[in-house]
Amino acid sequence: MILIPAIDLKDGQVLRFVRGLNDATHAVDISPVAQALEYVEHGFEYLHIVDLNGATSGQMANAKAIEDIAKALKIPFQVGGGIRSLSDIEFWLERGASRVVLGTIAQTDPHLIRQACQKFQGRICVSIDAKGGYVALSGWTKITSIKALELALRYEDAGVAAIIYTDIGRDGTTAGINIEMASDLAFALTTPLIAAGGLATLDDIIDLQKEKNSGIIGVIGGQALCDGRIDPKKALAAAGEQKTTVF
Protein backbone atom coordinates (compact mmCIF):
# COMPACT_ATOMS: atom_id res chain seq x y z
CA MET A 1 0.00 0.00 0.00
CA ILE A 2 1.43 3.37 -0.98
CA LEU A 3 1.86 6.04 1.68
CA ILE A 4 1.63 9.56 0.25
CA PRO A 5 2.46 12.64 2.33
CA ALA A 6 0.46 15.78 1.53
CA ILE A 7 1.58 19.37 1.11
CA ASP A 8 -1.31 21.82 1.44
CA LEU A 9 -0.57 25.32 0.14
CA LYS A 10 -2.30 28.61 0.84
CA ASP A 11 -0.91 32.00 -0.18
CA GLY A 12 2.38 30.32 -1.08
CA GLN A 13 2.83 28.82 2.39
CA VAL A 14 2.58 25.30 3.76
CA LEU A 15 -0.64 25.15 5.75
CA ARG A 16 -2.11 22.82 8.33
CA PHE A 17 -5.81 22.97 9.09
CA VAL A 18 -8.55 21.30 11.08
CA ARG A 19 -11.94 20.23 9.70
CA GLY A 20 -11.77 22.21 6.50
CA LEU A 21 -10.60 25.51 5.18
CA ASN A 22 -12.80 27.74 7.29
CA ASP A 23 -11.77 26.43 10.69
CA ALA A 24 -8.49 26.60 12.62
CA THR A 25 -5.47 26.93 10.33
CA HIS A 26 -1.83 27.74 10.73
CA ALA A 27 1.11 28.17 8.39
CA VAL A 28 4.16 26.01 9.00
CA ASP A 29 7.54 27.72 9.25
CA ILE A 30 9.05 25.81 6.35
CA SER A 31 9.13 26.57 2.65
CA PRO A 32 7.12 24.38 0.26
CA VAL A 33 10.33 23.12 -1.38
CA ALA A 34 11.97 22.36 1.97
CA GLN A 35 8.86 20.46 3.07
CA ALA A 36 8.87 18.41 -0.12
CA LEU A 37 12.57 17.60 0.17
CA GLU A 38 12.14 16.66 3.81
CA TYR A 39 9.58 14.05 2.79
CA VAL A 40 11.99 12.75 0.14
CA GLU A 41 14.76 12.47 2.72
CA HIS A 42 12.45 10.37 4.88
CA GLY A 43 12.11 7.92 2.01
CA PHE A 44 8.67 8.74 0.63
CA GLU A 45 8.37 8.00 -3.09
CA TYR A 46 5.27 10.04 -3.96
CA LEU A 47 3.75 13.40 -2.97
CA HIS A 48 0.23 14.84 -2.95
CA ILE A 49 0.11 18.63 -3.42
CA VAL A 50 -3.03 20.75 -3.00
CA ASP A 51 -3.64 24.39 -3.92
CA LEU A 52 -6.09 25.34 -1.17
CA ASN A 53 -6.78 28.79 -2.59
CA GLY A 54 -7.58 27.21 -5.91
CA ALA A 55 -9.92 24.68 -4.32
CA THR A 56 -12.23 27.47 -3.13
CA SER A 57 -11.75 30.02 -5.93
CA GLY A 58 -11.61 27.64 -8.88
CA GLN A 59 -8.41 29.29 -10.11
CA MET A 60 -4.83 28.12 -9.61
CA ALA A 61 -3.29 30.44 -7.03
CA ASN A 62 -0.14 28.66 -5.83
CA ALA A 63 1.36 27.80 -9.19
CA LYS A 64 4.74 29.38 -8.40
CA ALA A 65 5.18 27.38 -5.19
CA ILE A 66 4.11 24.14 -6.88
CA GLU A 67 6.38 24.75 -9.87
CA ASP A 68 9.29 25.30 -7.47
CA ILE A 69 8.53 21.96 -5.82
CA ALA A 70 8.28 20.25 -9.20
CA LYS A 71 11.71 21.58 -10.24
CA ALA A 72 13.28 20.32 -7.00
CA LEU A 73 11.68 16.86 -7.03
CA LYS A 74 12.90 13.66 -8.59
CA ILE A 75 9.91 11.62 -7.42
CA PRO A 76 6.37 11.46 -8.83
CA PHE A 77 3.74 13.84 -7.47
CA GLN A 78 0.07 14.54 -8.01
CA VAL A 79 -1.51 17.98 -7.81
CA GLY A 80 -5.05 19.23 -7.24
CA GLY A 81 -7.01 22.34 -6.33
CA GLY A 82 -8.55 24.84 -8.74
CA ILE A 83 -8.10 22.62 -11.79
CA ARG A 84 -11.20 23.13 -13.89
CA SER A 85 -10.24 22.65 -17.56
CA LEU A 86 -8.25 20.51 -19.98
CA SER A 87 -5.75 23.35 -20.33
CA ASP A 88 -5.29 23.43 -16.53
CA ILE A 89 -4.61 19.69 -16.57
CA GLU A 90 -2.14 20.02 -19.43
CA PHE A 91 -0.42 22.90 -17.60
CA TRP A 92 0.50 20.64 -14.69
CA LEU A 93 1.35 17.57 -16.71
CA GLU A 94 3.77 19.67 -18.75
CA ARG A 95 5.37 20.83 -15.50
CA GLY A 96 6.11 17.37 -14.24
CA ALA A 97 2.99 16.18 -12.42
CA SER A 98 2.45 12.45 -12.75
CA ARG A 99 -1.24 12.74 -11.94
CA VAL A 100 -3.78 15.55 -11.79
CA VAL A 101 -6.50 15.38 -9.16
CA LEU A 102 -9.96 16.67 -10.11
CA GLY A 103 -12.51 17.34 -7.41
CA THR A 104 -15.33 19.86 -7.83
CA ILE A 105 -15.70 19.29 -11.58
CA ALA A 106 -16.33 15.59 -10.95
CA GLN A 107 -19.74 16.74 -9.77
CA THR A 108 -20.26 19.80 -11.94
CA ASP A 109 -18.77 18.69 -15.27
CA PRO A 110 -18.70 14.90 -15.74
CA HIS A 111 -18.15 15.30 -19.49
CA LEU A 112 -14.85 17.07 -18.81
CA ILE A 113 -13.75 14.21 -16.54
CA ARG A 114 -14.37 11.71 -19.33
CA GLN A 115 -12.61 13.93 -21.86
CA ALA A 116 -9.62 14.25 -19.54
CA CYS A 117 -9.43 10.51 -18.91
CA GLN A 118 -9.48 9.84 -22.63
CA LYS A 119 -6.92 12.52 -23.52
CA PHE A 120 -4.58 11.91 -20.57
CA GLN A 121 -4.96 8.20 -20.06
CA GLY A 122 -3.91 6.91 -16.66
CA ARG A 123 -3.09 10.37 -15.36
CA ILE A 124 -6.41 11.54 -13.90
CA CYS A 125 -7.55 10.96 -10.32
CA VAL A 126 -10.98 11.95 -9.02
CA SER A 127 -11.09 13.37 -5.52
CA ILE A 128 -14.27 12.77 -3.54
CA ASP A 129 -14.46 14.76 -0.33
CA ALA A 130 -17.38 13.82 1.85
CA LYS A 131 -18.99 14.69 5.16
CA GLY A 132 -21.39 12.17 6.64
CA GLY A 133 -21.14 10.26 3.38
CA TYR A 134 -22.25 13.23 1.24
CA VAL A 135 -20.05 14.96 -1.33
CA ALA A 136 -18.52 18.34 -0.48
CA LEU A 137 -17.47 20.82 -3.18
CA SER A 138 -15.43 24.02 -3.62
CA GLY A 139 -12.89 23.44 -0.88
CA TRP A 140 -15.46 21.83 1.39
CA THR A 141 -17.62 24.97 1.52
CA LYS A 142 -20.68 23.28 -0.03
CA ILE A 143 -22.23 19.98 1.06
CA THR A 144 -24.38 18.37 -1.62
CA SER A 145 -27.12 15.75 -1.52
CA ILE A 146 -24.98 13.36 -3.59
CA LYS A 147 -23.55 10.35 -1.81
CA ALA A 148 -19.85 9.58 -2.24
CA LEU A 149 -20.52 6.11 -3.65
CA GLU A 150 -23.03 7.46 -6.17
CA LEU A 151 -20.47 9.93 -7.51
CA ALA A 152 -17.69 7.35 -7.61
CA LEU A 153 -19.84 4.88 -9.55
CA ARG A 154 -20.44 7.47 -12.27
CA TYR A 155 -16.80 7.13 -13.30
CA GLU A 156 -16.31 3.39 -13.10
CA ASP A 157 -16.06 3.14 -16.89
CA ALA A 158 -14.26 6.45 -17.49
CA GLY A 159 -10.68 5.29 -17.04
CA VAL A 160 -9.97 7.13 -13.78
CA ALA A 161 -6.58 6.07 -12.36
CA ALA A 162 -7.80 6.26 -8.76
CA ILE A 163 -10.50 7.66 -6.50
CA ILE A 164 -9.14 9.71 -3.60
CA TYR A 165 -11.68 9.56 -0.77
CA THR A 166 -11.40 12.10 2.04
CA ASP A 167 -13.57 12.16 5.16
CA ILE A 168 -13.51 15.92 5.75
CA GLY A 169 -14.87 15.53 9.26
CA ARG A 170 -11.51 13.98 10.12
CA ASP A 171 -9.06 15.72 7.82
CA GLY A 172 -6.45 17.66 9.79
CA THR A 173 -7.76 16.32 13.11
CA THR A 174 -5.48 13.26 13.43
CA ALA A 175 -8.61 11.52 14.71
CA GLY A 176 -7.94 8.43 12.65
CA ILE A 177 -8.87 7.37 9.13
CA ASN A 178 -12.51 6.39 8.59
CA ILE A 179 -11.43 2.89 7.62
CA GLU A 180 -14.92 1.40 7.58
CA MET A 181 -16.24 3.96 5.10
CA ALA A 182 -13.11 3.82 2.94
CA SER A 183 -13.11 0.02 2.76
CA ASP A 184 -16.85 -0.11 2.01
CA LEU A 185 -16.39 2.37 -0.82
CA ALA A 186 -13.35 0.55 -2.18
CA PHE A 187 -15.14 -2.79 -2.07
CA ALA A 188 -18.02 -1.39 -4.15
CA LEU A 189 -15.67 -0.10 -6.87
CA THR A 190 -13.33 -1.60 -9.42
CA THR A 191 -11.40 1.70 -9.55
CA PRO A 192 -8.49 1.73 -7.04
CA LEU A 193 -9.10 3.86 -3.95
CA ILE A 194 -6.72 6.05 -1.94
CA ALA A 195 -7.95 6.96 1.55
CA ALA A 196 -7.34 10.36 3.16
CA GLY A 197 -8.42 12.42 6.12
CA GLY A 198 -7.37 11.98 9.73
CA LEU A 199 -4.30 9.74 9.55
CA ALA A 200 -3.11 9.76 13.15
CA THR A 201 -1.14 6.71 14.21
CA LEU A 202 0.87 3.80 12.94
CA ASP A 203 -2.15 1.62 13.75
CA ASP A 204 -4.16 3.47 11.08
CA ILE A 205 -1.65 2.36 8.46
CA ILE A 206 -1.56 -1.19 9.80
CA ASP A 207 -5.36 -1.40 9.83
CA LEU A 208 -5.60 0.00 6.29
CA GLN A 209 -3.03 -2.50 5.11
CA LYS A 210 -5.36 -5.25 6.32
CA GLU A 211 -8.07 -3.84 4.04
CA LYS A 212 -5.97 -3.78 0.86
CA ASN A 213 -7.97 -6.65 -0.62
CA SER A 214 -11.01 -4.36 -0.61
CA GLY A 215 -9.33 -2.17 -3.22
CA ILE A 216 -7.57 0.39 -1.02
CA ILE A 217 -4.18 0.89 -2.62
CA GLY A 218 -2.91 3.83 -0.62
CA VAL A 219 -3.35 6.48 2.05
CA ILE A 220 -2.58 10.21 2.13
CA GLY A 221 -1.31 11.72 5.36
CA GLY A 222 -0.40 15.23 6.42
CA GLN A 223 -0.05 16.61 9.90
CA ALA A 224 0.89 13.39 11.69
CA LEU A 225 3.70 12.76 9.22
CA CYS A 226 5.03 16.30 9.76
CA ASP A 227 4.89 16.69 13.51
CA GLY A 228 6.61 13.41 14.38
CA ARG A 229 3.48 11.70 15.60
CA ILE A 230 4.16 8.92 13.10
CA ASP A 231 7.75 7.87 12.48
CA PRO A 232 8.25 7.94 8.68
CA LYS A 233 10.45 4.84 8.57
CA LYS A 234 8.03 2.80 10.66
CA ALA A 235 5.12 4.13 8.60
CA LEU A 236 6.73 3.09 5.32
CA ALA A 237 7.57 -0.32 6.75
CA ALA A 238 3.98 -0.81 7.90
CA ALA A 239 2.61 0.29 4.53
CA GLY A 240 4.74 -2.26 2.70
CA GLU A 241 5.49 -2.25 -1.03
CA GLN A 242 5.46 1.29 -2.42
CA LYS A 243 5.53 0.56 -6.13
CA THR A 244 2.20 1.03 -7.84
CA THR A 245 0.63 1.40 -11.27
CA VAL A 246 -1.24 4.50 -10.10
CA PHE A 247 1.85 6.65 -10.68
Image (cartoon, grey):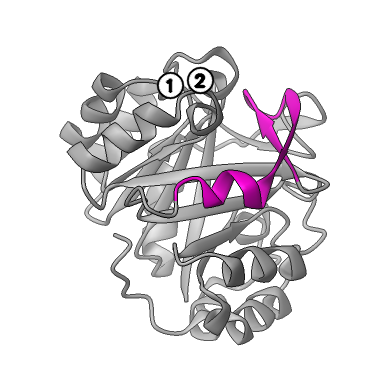
Write the residue at 54% across / 52% down: 153
Q: Is residue 177 visible?
A: no
Instruction: Give the vertical position of 59 relative to 42 (above or below).
Output: above
**Marks 2 and 1 in Cβ contact (< 8 Å):** yes
The kind of secondary structure element at disc 1 is loop
Other residues around mark 2 within 10 Å, as few (<14) / some (14–19) / many (≥20): many
Q: Quadrant of residue 242?
A: bottom left
Q: Quadrant of residue 118?
A: top left
The mark closer to the camera, 2 or 1, is 2
Going by the image, does 11 lie left or right of 197?
Answer: left
Going by the image, does 157 lie left or right of 213?
Answer: left
Question: Which tag, 2 or 1, sits closer to the chain's start?
Answer: 2
- Amino acid at the residue labelled 2: Gly
Write the residue at 42% across / 18% down: 60
Residue carrying label 1: 62
Instruction: Give the vertical position of 212 relative to 222 (above or below).
Output: below
Task: Classify the position of the C terminus by image quarter.
Answer: bottom left
Q: Picture coordinates of residue 189 (x, y %)?
A: 53, 64
Q: Picture coordinates of residue 122 (x, y %)?
A: 25, 53
- Amino acid at the residue labelled 1: Asn
Residue carrying label 2: 54
Residue 154: say if magenta.
yes
The kind of secondary structure element at disc 2 is helix
Look at the image and give the residue range highlighted in magenta.
Answer: 134-155
Front residue of this view, candidates 130 and 202: 130
